[in-house]
Image (cartoon, rainbow, N blue to C red):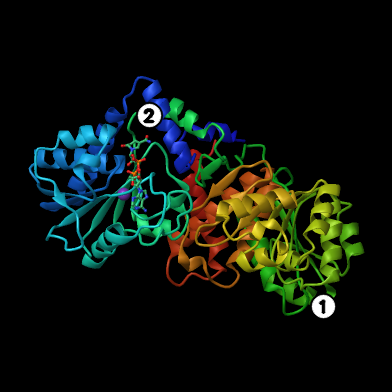
Amino acid sequence: MHDPSAAESANLALLTVQAMRRVDAAAIGSGTSGLTLMQRAGAAVADRALAMGGEKILVLCGPGNNGGDGFVAARLLVDAGRSVELQLLGDRASLAGDAALAAAEWPGPVGRANASLPDCDLVIDALFGAGLSRDLEGNARALVEAVNEAGQPVLSVDVPSGLDGDTGRIRGAAIRAQETVTFVALKPGHLLQPGRSLCGHITLADIGTGPAALGAGLAGAPRLFRNAPGLWTLPALSASSHKYTRGHALVLSGPAFKTGAARLAARGALRVGAGLVTIASPASALPENAAHLTAIMLRPCETADDLDDLLVDDRLNALLLGPGLGTGPATCELVAVAASAGRALVLDADALTSFRSELRTLARHLRDGEARAVLTPHEGEFGRLFSGTEVLAQDLTKPERTARAAHLAGAVVVLKGADTVIAAPDGRIAINDHGSPYLGTAGSGDVLGGLICGLLAQGLEPFEAACAAVWLHGDAGLRHGPGLIAEDIPELMPAVLRDLAPSVS
Ligand SMILES: NC(=O)C1=CN([C@@H]2O[C@H](COP(=O)(O)OP(=O)(O)OC[C@H]3O[C@@H](n4cnc5c(N)ncnc54)[C@H](O)[C@@H]3O)[C@@H](O)[C@H]2O)[C@H](O)CC1
Ligand SMILES: [K+]
């Protein structure tokens, strides 16, 4: 299994804006000057600008080092034969440090940035980056709105101006970029909505700060990662693998006419590689479940006692409860029995809502049973389960909310959405940007629960199982696109897993 610290030196670790500032100092400490960093950053921006095409380029520079990057890029684009107009927001005399040095190298005129934009083929947005500290107002806001209004392609430096690099939130107004070039590491705001949508295509440029400086930036920063292969490792099969070495997942079904969710989940668990999958079904639903199942086994299960009897078989090493069970005391009893069995456990939908405002009870069940649990709420279920706790404080970012929820619940929490966040009680947080809006279809979440359960059955630890399943689920959505229904997702797993196989150890 991957040690996440190994990921921290790859491009999976995310830097907060405050951490980015520490990188500056660390890089300079290692003999790299801030200006060198700026020159490399500006060169990376110029490269992307040339690749985006266009003869007439408008470079909008802000009052700090983001603007400094713009000055460097502008000079290099002139050297490459482009027609470049540079406009500065603020006074040239107020430029300081490396930005002033970069401006001194700019041979051309420096116009005053204003909302009446000159005609151009491409705008380079070097107004604000990691130093944005408040909402844009006045000229700055008017300029950003004018750029969006004009509709020319925009290349943003580090972060689209007006976007908060840590939260992905818009500060008054924010540039809508076609491309963004960022440095050292991605920031959370590059992956969190609406930031993800405003960045367009993101290029992470290597400006030579390397793992040492990255490590300096990470010291003490929250352990934030981009959810991607490398953060987790899928189980590798060996010639001696057989169905009993690949785990046995148990999915609880709802009563008659509420059984589809369990079958979607069970199919997901089987397709992602669990050796055996069983659906535990109330008697009323046995015929309809049986009519739809082939490789998935079926056992009767009416009550919590029946579940207790089933769990005598300790080969059932991963459980999924939730979809279709209905909310109320009976479901709470099933969860209590499942949690006490000390297996890997996925709780979704009704299994979460049944503990509405009863988080402490659920957390106690999980703790007493030493369950290795993954909770998979969408925002509505999250709000119900964590109502009355500090998790719902207004000013928390999505990663902060999820991390606090994981800590309170003593479980991995997958807060689903266009920017699903996965958090573990030990402080690890992963943000997923590998997904598709086509996954917003009935039953899609049921399949995700099954993918997590199937990976848990194969021995992945809860955080990795959750991150991998979210990524696989997203990949299926990206492959299929329009017309996707939940039933398609398990059937897309062979192609998704096949393409990952080279990276699977
Ligand atoms: N850290 C690195 O490794 C590198 C950083 N580079 C670039 O530097 C910027 C960050 O520069 P900084 O001077 O800290 O801030 P900004 O340029 O983003 O902001 C400019 C300045 O603007 C003022 N300000 C903040 N918010 C507002 C607002 N709402 N309205 C008006 N003015 C505002 C504030 O004074 C800021 O200081 C980073 O993004 C990179 O592009 C290097 O060049 C590459 C390596
Ligand atoms: K910018």
Q: Is residue 441 left or right of residue 423?
A: left
Q: Residue at x 11, y 48 (%)?
A: 84
Kind of element beneath mark 2: loop
Specify the quarter for ligand 1. Answer: top left
Asked whether the residues under the numbered discs 1 and 2 touch, taking CB atoms below 8 Å apart as contact, a structural biologist would say no
User: Where does the N terminus fall, quadrant-wise?
Assistant: top right
Q: Nearer the viewer, residue 291 or 33?
A: 33
Q: Position of residue 89 (x, y in %)?
A: 23, 51
Q: Residue at x 47, y 40 (%)?
A: 18
Q: Nearer the viewer, residue 406 or 455?
A: 406
Question: What residue is shown with label 2?
Answer: 209
Question: What residue is shown with label 1?
Answer: 284
Inspect the image, locate mark 2, and give the three-letter code of the amino acid beneath it.
Thr
Q: Is residue 376 in sight in this rendering?
A: no
Q: Nearer the viewer, residue 142 or 239?
A: 142
Q: Position of residue 408 (x, y in %)?
A: 73, 51
Inspect the image, locate mark 1, and give the three-letter code of the amino acid beneath it.
Ser
Tell me the CA gap for discs 1 and 2.
Answer: 63 Å
- Judged by depth in the image, the label closer to the viewer, 1 or 2, is 2
Q: Is mark 2 within 8 Å of ligand 1?
A: yes
- The first of marks 1 and 2 along the sequence is 2
Q: Position of residue 214 (x, y in %)?
A: 45, 31
Kind of element beneath mark 1: helix
Label 2: how many residues lie within 10 Å, few (<14), some (14-19) or many (20+)? Answer: many
Q: How many marks?
A: 2
User: Where does the C terminus fall, quadrant-wise?
Assistant: top right
Q: Residue at x 69, y 48 (%)?
A: 456
Q: For residue 336, which quarter of the picture?
A: bottom right
Q: Is residue 373 left or right of residue 234?
A: right
